[in-house]
Image (spheres, grey):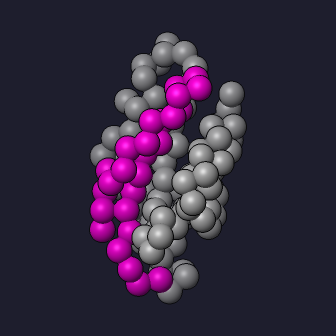
Amino acid sequence: MKGGDYEERVAIYLTGLGWEVLERNFRCRGGEIDIVARDGRVIVFVEVKGGKNFDFGDPAERFNARKLGRILRCAYSFMEKRNIRSHFRVDLIIVRGEEIEHIRNVGFY
């Protein structure tokens, strides 16, 4: 599986939760957000990490403060470009084989 495959699985998962997927692979200067979605009235910026084998460690270990900083820069850019003024949060979703782990609120702003 490649990154896009994991993102597709997560988009289907989020839609199943009743979320609206607003955009995928939003790029800004210095970063990218895998999925931008709406959970009720909250905009959620979703980082997807996946892997079948753990030769390079668990996929969750590839998320750190530096990556969160990049996501936040892009999140503010997304909100500004669309003139959205509301709170938002950052969720991390890890795909390990068939398992999906959803960690909400790795950042809430």
Q: Is residue 26 left or right of residue 103?
A: right
Q: Residue at x 62, y 55 (%)?
A: 15
In the picture, residue 10 is in which quadrant? top right
For residue 107: magenta?
yes
Would you say the magenta stretch is mainly helix, strand or loop?
A: strand
Q: Nearer the viewer, residue 31 or 46?
A: 46
Q: Is residue 49 left or right of residue 107?
A: right
Work out whether residue 67 can be spotted. no
Work out whether residue 69 can be spotted. yes
Q: Nearer the viewer, residue 56 or 24?
A: 24
In the picture, residue 51 is in which quadrant? top right
Q: Can you say which quadrant of the picture contains the C terminus?
A: bottom left
Q: Is residue 87 above or below residue 68?
A: below
Q: Is residue 76 above or below residue 68?
A: below
Q: Is residue 20 above or below residue 62?
A: below
Q: Nearer the viewer, residue 87 or 29?
A: 87
x and y, in percent, of residue 53 in the image: 54, 15
Q: Nearer the viewer, residue 101 or 61?
A: 101
Q: Residue at x 41, y 84 (%)?
A: 85
Q: Is residue 64 above or below residue 57?
A: below
Q: Is residue 7 left or right of residue 54?
A: right
Q: Residue at x 51, y 72 (%)?
A: 78
Give the magenta part as a residue range: 84-109
x and y, in percent, of residue 36 in the image: 55, 62
x and y, in percent, of residue 20 in the image: 60, 65
How many numbered tags mark residues here?
A: 0
x and y, in percent, of residue 86 in the image: 38, 80
For residue 76: magenta?
no
